[in-house]
Image (cartoon, rainbow, N blue to C red):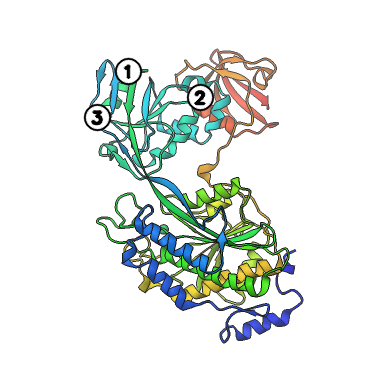
Amino acid sequence: MLNKIFYSGDSSRIIFFVLVISLLPLNINGQQFKIDSIRLKSNLLFLADDSMKGRAPGTQEDSISAAFIANQLRDYGFVPLIGNSILIPFTFTIHREVVFGSTFRTLGRDLKVGVDFRIHPISPNVQVEGEIMVMDFGDLKRLSANPSAIESSPMKKVFDGKLLLVKVPYDSIQFYTTPVSLLGFKALLFYSSEASSISDKSRSSGVSIPVIWISDSLAEVFLNEKNLFCEIAGKINVVRARSYNIAAVKPGIDNRYIMAGAHYDHLGNGGEGSGSMLRSGEGIHNGADDNASGVVSVLESGRVLSELFNKKWSGNKGNYGVAIAAFGAEERGLIGSKVLADTLLALNKLPSLMLNLDMVGRMKENKLQTGGAGTFKGADSLIRKVNENFNFQLTVTNDGFGPSDHSSFYNKGVPVLYFTTGVHKEYHTPDDDAKLINFKGLTMVTEYLTSIISEIIESRFEPEYIKSMAPASDTRRSFKVTLGLIPDFTYEKGDGFRVGSVTDGRPAQIAGMKEGDIIINMNSKKINNIYDYMTALGELKQGSKTQVVIKRDLQEIILQIEL
Ligand SMILES: [Zn+2]
C-alpha cells in the first residue's frame, strides 16, 4: 500500500527533482509552488514584536494575534471549519485564589489559617467533614499505581468518606488527587515542611477534591490520635478569561481533511507559574520560535495549498480538504487544542491526520525532528520519502504523545505528525527573539510540510491510526483477578495480611485458605500489609497459577492457587 504513494512508476521525476531543487521553486507533480519567505518573515516579526507583549492567553494582544491569523486565512480563501466563524472563542482559568476566611475545626477548637493549615488554591470549594486516616506515602504511591482496583475491593469501605492525611512532597501533590479520590477519600490533607509558604493563588488547573496543607505540629496531633474528626471549609475564586482557537478549512469533496496546526500563544511577561525559565524577574517573552515560527509556517503552507486547490485540485473527487488551525493557551496545558479536539470529536469531524509544528524556527545543521511516526501505518516512509527532496537530517520518533498540541488529537484517535527544530538555551526566556530565527530553515520546513500534505492529497494516501500506550501517568491497571477473600482490616501488625473470610467456590477457598490465615508471601513477593497484597494481586493474570505462603497457628503453609 505504501509504495503506491510516491511517484510509483515515475522514477524520472524523482531524478528531475534532485537535480533542480536548488534552482527552481518546488515542483509537485508538475505543479509549481513557491513559499513566500518574505511573508513568513513579516508575519513572524508581527507576532514576535514587543508590542504583542508575549501573546499571553486572555490578554488583548492574544485577541489581536488570533484576529491577525484568522484574517489571513480568510484572505487565502479558507472558510470556517466549525460553525460560521474561523475565530472560535473558549474560556479558561487564568488563576484560582483562596478567598479569605477558611476554617478548620477539630478537637472542639478552630485552627489558625496560615499557621496550622492552608487550603490549596487548586481545590474546589471546600465543605468537608470526616475522620482523618493517616497513610504512608509509600503506600499511597503503590495504591495510586492502580486506584481502580480498589473499586471492587472491600478496602473501599475503609477509605470511603474519610479525609486522607499523608506526607507528600509539595510539588507532586496534584498528581495524587485523582487516585486519592478514586480510592474513596473526600479530601487530601498533606504536610510537607517546604510547603509552609504555599500561595493562596495558583495558575494550575483545578482538581476534583479539596487539598489542604497542614503544619508539621498539626500532623503530629493526627498521627498520635487516630481517627480525629474535622470540619474544613473554604471558598475558591476562579478567575476565567477568553482565548481563541483559529480553525479554517479549504474543503475537499467529502468531509475528510488533513489539519496543519500550531499554537500561537506564549508566556506574556513570564513570572511565577508561567512556565518561564527566568529564575527571577519578568520581561516580554516574545516566543519568536515558540511558537510564532510554527504559526507563520502553517499559515504560509495554507496560502500555498489554497492556491493548489484553486488551480489544480478543485473538482478532483475524493481529495481531502486542508484545515489550518492555530491554538490558544497551549502554554497553559494544551487547553485550546483540547477544546478544539473535543468539539471536533463531538461533531464527528476529526481530521484524518494532524500535523503539528512547534518551534521550527531554529534549524541548525539541517536538523529536523519529527515525531508521531508510530501513530499511523506508512508514516515513516512518508516523511523519509518526501525528505529525499530536502535532505534534512531527520530524527524520527514514534510517540504520538508529547508536550504539544498533537497530543490532544492523538488522544482522540487521530494519526499525528510533529515537527520541531528542537529546544535551545533561549527556550521560554525573553531572549526567544526574531533575530535568532533561521528564516531559510523555516522556509524549508514550510516547503517540507506543504510537500507532505500535497503528497497525501495527490496520492490519496489514507493514514491508518495505530494505537499506542498512553504515557505511564495515564495508565491505570485494573484488577483482572480476585482471590475471593475479604481482608481483616483490623489486623495491623505489619507481618502480613490477615484473611477475614473466604468466599465459597472462589480460588482462595479452593486452594484451602481459611479465615484467620495470614498471607506473608504471594507470587514470590513479601507481603507486609494489605497494600503489598494489592500490588501483588495487580500483577497476576486470569488463568495463571501462583504460590501463596500463609501463616496458620505458627505454621507456615504453601498453597497453590489457580486463578
Ligand atoms: Zn512553549
Q: Secondary structure at mark 3?
A: loop
Looking at this view, name the residue that lies furthest to the right: 9
Quarter of the image that includes the N terminus: bottom right
Q: CA distance from mark 2 to mark 3?
A: 35 Å
- For label 2, being within 8 Å of ligand 1 is answered no
The disc at residue 530 is 2
Question: Can residue 397 be seen here?
Answer: no
Residue at 67% across, 80% down: 30
- The residue where tag 3 is placed is 113
Q: Residues within 10 Å of mark 1 (few under 14, many from 20)?
A: few
Toward the viewer: 366 or 88?
88
| Image coordinates for residue 155, horizontal then vertical, percent | 51, 22
For the point 43% across and 47% down, the residue is: 91
Q: Which residue is mark 1?
A: 225
Residue plotted at (61% across, 14% down)? 514
Crowding at dot 2, Cα within 10 Å, few <14 / some 14-19 / many 20+, comes out as many
Q: Check contact, mark 3 vs mark 1: CB within 8 A.
A: no
On the image, the x and y values in percent for residue 443 come to: 50, 75
Sequence-wise, the earlier of marks 1 and 2 is 1
150 vs 245, nearest the viewer: 245
Does residue 277 appear left or right of residue 444 in this picture? left
Residue 102 seen in the current view = yes
Pick the front one: 442 or 136 = 442
- Quadrant field for ligand 1: bottom left
State the separation of the CA atoms marked 3 and 1: 21 Å
Tell us which disc is closer to us: 3 or 1.
3
